[in-house]
Image (cartoon, helix red, strand yellow):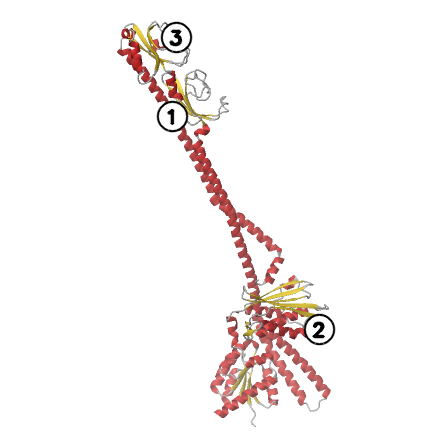
């Protein structure tokens, strides 16, 4: 409770408070803004930058992988077709057509070709007229003439031919490989149907996740294998035209474009097989293809935004805390500044009043001796009327009384400016108070004022200046009594209470008097401030009280309501600062004490 | 009986002159000077019982004067007069051997009492020596 009367004053001035509040909110916004700029924004940018870069990077990697997959499958298929073609060529060129025509020989060749795996379903030797010379297979095709079939025409032209899937005479999707042998002007053709099941398993059994698929289609977009999803072998492939213009490529099929509505977005890689002209398509739902990347990215983004949120929350909380500390510091500084101003004011006034007191003492001394000289003159005057003598003496008494009054003022001034003596002794606070009350009781009763005491028992005696302390109480009680002027009755309450926390004692002196207005409340501790009539008060009582209590290491605060009364609260420490008294203890010479009392 | 001989040193001439009038009537022989320098000279010329010395004087101040007086006449008793503002110098004076000090404004009765106490001590000390 440092100088509470000053704190009370500050609340009366709402102007600066508003300004300060604005200042704090500005500071608050500035702090938040700076933190955002310095931490949140960079983190945000870096986070999103890494996210964007990493996403692009992973997509490229995944698409590369997809393309590689397509190439790999193409190689597998091309290898397979090349091997089968070689099988046929080997058979046709190592055996003469006559040999192959003889019963049983073609069967032996067929079983050798199918030794490791049943690659072929049937095998036939055909002459240049399109007639079967020999045939091994499950179908009854020996009498068929192929001269009008598309593949016969092609193979006669090219020498080697691998067909697209077709149904042919047997009414089941299959494709054939045919090779020719030319001897003179004669031609033989060895033709084999590739085992459709085996071939399809090469392509269709590739599994990529739950939505991946691999299939083949020919140049007209007719499916050569059955995709896992949508479409069947020999049907039209459900893919938009114009997508496979390049030799190989990769792209993303948007569902909304190209009439591609029935599927979600898909990642598609394709590559063309040289012979036959088939395209190999590797296809997977976009979301599944990028599932891992998206998953990782989502986790990263969630983490990023969570971090941002935490930073923001921590920033807000810590900024609030900092602002609170700054605010408290400011308030403390403010109070301290006010105290310093007050102390400075009192100190300079102290210097001034000491000077004034000293300068006035000299003329007062002369006046006093002058009046004494006159008294002597009157006493020794031989023929003077007694009445005149008495009147002159009365007049001189008045002069001396006024000089005495002046001398009391100068004494008070010097007390206020600490140039006076101080005597330290053990003080029993309650006894001291009771003594003062006894002294003041007469005056109080005369004005219809009662004392209400609430003194805590067993307050230990403590080191203090007993006479100064009594002077303080006399001053305060005197003021309280005077505050009742014009009221028929009143009450002065006096309480004592030990304050264990601060290791001292609290004295409360309250009255039911006229109270002090807020503007006067600011000035009551200033020297020479009084509301009493001229000649009735010096205006030094509360200044002396204030400086005395400060000197004792205590403090004093006041609260007042006009018309209701005033409460003074004094705190006195049990252990006053030693240095305060040391300077004054040597002044306690008996001569000095006598003089001050006189 | 011999009247006590007193030297009054004060730059306030009115005050000093009033003291002369008052103290003379009360049975003292008084000499007055208005500055420290004269006071020191006077003490050298004549023997005084008590010196009433003002502390605050222009030129040679009370403390310096006291020091010089005590050098020239160690037995003389000095009563210091001081304003409240210079208690410290009063105490310094007592440390230098002054009998006591009084504060202005002083009533003639107090001054007379103090001077007679000082005179008494001077007598006692003179008898001893």
What is the CA distance from the residue labelled 3 to the residue labelled 1? 36 Å
Report in which chain the residue with disc 3 lies: A
How many marks on residues? Answer: 3
From where the camera sits, is residue A61 visible?
Answer: yes
Position of residue A45 in the picture relative to residue A20 (left or right) = left
State the SS at label 2.
helix
> Which circle's residue, 2 or 3, is located before the other in the chain?
3
Point 31% across, 12% down: residue? A110
Label 2–label 3 contact, CB within 8 A? no
Label 3 in the same subunit as label 1:
yes
Q: Secondary structure at mark 1?
A: helix
Q: Chain of mark 1?
A: A
Chain of the residue under the numbered disc 2 shown in the image: A
> What residue is disc 3 on?
A149
- Which is more toward the observer, A592 or A137? A137
The image shows residue A565 at horizontal and vertical percentages of 67, 64
* Residue at mark 2: A446
Q: Which residue is mark 1?
A: A69
Closer to the chain start, of discs 3 and 1, is 1
What's the CA distance linking mark 2 and mark 3? 147 Å
Marks 2 and 1, the one that precedes in the sequence: 1
Q: Residue at x 45, y 28 (%)?
A: A286
Query: Do the residues at discs 2 and 3 belong to one chain?
Result: yes
**In the image, residue A493 above or below residue B62:** above
């Amino acid at each position: 409770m440092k100088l509470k009367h000053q704190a009370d004053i500050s609340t009366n001035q709402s102007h600066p408070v508003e300004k300060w509040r604005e200042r704090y909110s500005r500071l608050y916004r500035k702090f938040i803004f700076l933190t955002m700029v310095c931490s949140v924004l960079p983190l945000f940018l870096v986070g999103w930058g890494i996210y964007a870069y990493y996403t692009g990077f992973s997509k490229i990697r995944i698409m590369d992988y997809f393309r590689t997959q397509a190439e790999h499958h193409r190689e597998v298929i091309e290898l397979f077709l090349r091997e089968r073609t070689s099988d046929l060529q080997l058979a046709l060129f190592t055996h003469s057509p006559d040999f192959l025509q003889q019963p049983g020989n073609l069967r032996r060749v067929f079983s050798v070709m199918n030794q490791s795996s049943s690659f072929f379903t049937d095998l036939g030797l055909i002459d240049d007229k399109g007639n079967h010379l020999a045939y091994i297979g499950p179908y009854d095709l020996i009498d068929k003439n192929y001269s009008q079939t598309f593949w016969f025409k092609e193979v006669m032209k090219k020498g080697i031919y691998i067909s697209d899937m077709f149904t042919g005479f047997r009414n089941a999707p299959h494709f054939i490989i045919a090779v020719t042998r030319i001897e003179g002007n004669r031609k033989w053709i060895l033709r084999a149907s590739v085992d459709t099941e085996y071939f399809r398993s090469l392509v269709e059994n590739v599994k990529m996740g739950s939505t991946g698929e691999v299939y083949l289609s020919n140049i007209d977009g007719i499916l050569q294998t059955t995709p896992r999803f949508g479409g069947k072998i020999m049907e039209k492939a459900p893919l938009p035209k114009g997508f496979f213009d390049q030799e190989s490529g990769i792209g993303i099929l948007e569902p909304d474009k190209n009439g591609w509505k029935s599927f979600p977005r898909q990642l598609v890689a394709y590559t063309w097989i040289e012979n036959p002209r088939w395209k190999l398509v590797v296809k997977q739902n976009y979301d599944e293809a990028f599932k891992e990347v998206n998953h990782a990215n989502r986790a990263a983004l969630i983490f990023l935004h969570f971090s941002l949120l935490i930073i923001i929350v921590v920033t807000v909380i810590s900024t609030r805390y900092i602002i609170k500390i700054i605010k408290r510091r400011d308030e403390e500084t403010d109070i301290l500044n006010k105290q310093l101003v007050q102390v400075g004011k009192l100190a300079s006034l102290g210097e001034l009043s000491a000077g004034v007191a000293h300068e006035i003492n000299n003329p007062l001394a002369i006046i006093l001796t002058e009046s004494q000289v006159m008294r002597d003159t009157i006493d020794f005057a031989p023929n003077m009327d007694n009445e005149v003598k008495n009147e002159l003496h009365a007049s001189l008494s008045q002069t001396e009384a006024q000089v005495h009054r002046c001398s009391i003022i100068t004494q008070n001034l010097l007390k206020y400016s600490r140039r006076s003596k101080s005597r330290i002794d053990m003080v029993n606070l309650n006894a001291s108070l009771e003594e003062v009350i006894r002294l003041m009781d007469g005056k109080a009763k005369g004005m219809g004022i009662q004392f209400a005491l609430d003194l805590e028992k067993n307050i230990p005696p403590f080191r203090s200046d007993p006479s100064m302390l009594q002077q303080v109480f006399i001053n305060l009680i005197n003021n309280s009594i005077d505050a009742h002027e014009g009221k028929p009755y009143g009450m002065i309450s006096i309480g004592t209470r030990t304050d264990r926390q601060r290791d001292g004692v609290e004295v409360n002196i309250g009255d039911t008097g006229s109270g002090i207005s807020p503007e006067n409340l600011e000035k009551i501790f200033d020297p020479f401030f009084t509301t009493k009539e001229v000649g009735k008060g010096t205006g030094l009582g509360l200044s002396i009280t204030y400086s005395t209590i400060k000197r004792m290491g205590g403090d004093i605060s006041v609260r007042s309501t006009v018309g209701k009364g005033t409460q003074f609260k004094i705190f006195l420490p049990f252990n006053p600062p030693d240095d305060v008294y040391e300077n004054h203890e040597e002044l306690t010479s008996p001569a000095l004490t006598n003089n001050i009392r006189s | 009986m011999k009247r006590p001989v007193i030297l009054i040193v004060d730059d306030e001439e009115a005050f000093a002159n009033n003291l002369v009038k008052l103290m003379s009537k009360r049975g003292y022989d008084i000499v007055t000077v208005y500055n420290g320098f004269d006071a020191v000279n006077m003490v050298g010329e004549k023997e005084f019982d008590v010196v009433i010395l003002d502390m605050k004087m222009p030129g040679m101040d009370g403390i310096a004067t006291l020091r010089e007086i005590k050098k020239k006449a160690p037995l003389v008793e000095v009563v210091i007069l001081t304003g409240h503002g210079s208690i410290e110098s009063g105490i310094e004076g007592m440390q230098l051997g002054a009998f006591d000090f009084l504060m202005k404004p002083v009533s003639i009765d107090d001054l007379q009492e103090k001077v007679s106490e000082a005179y008494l001590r001077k007598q006692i000390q003179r008898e001893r020596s």
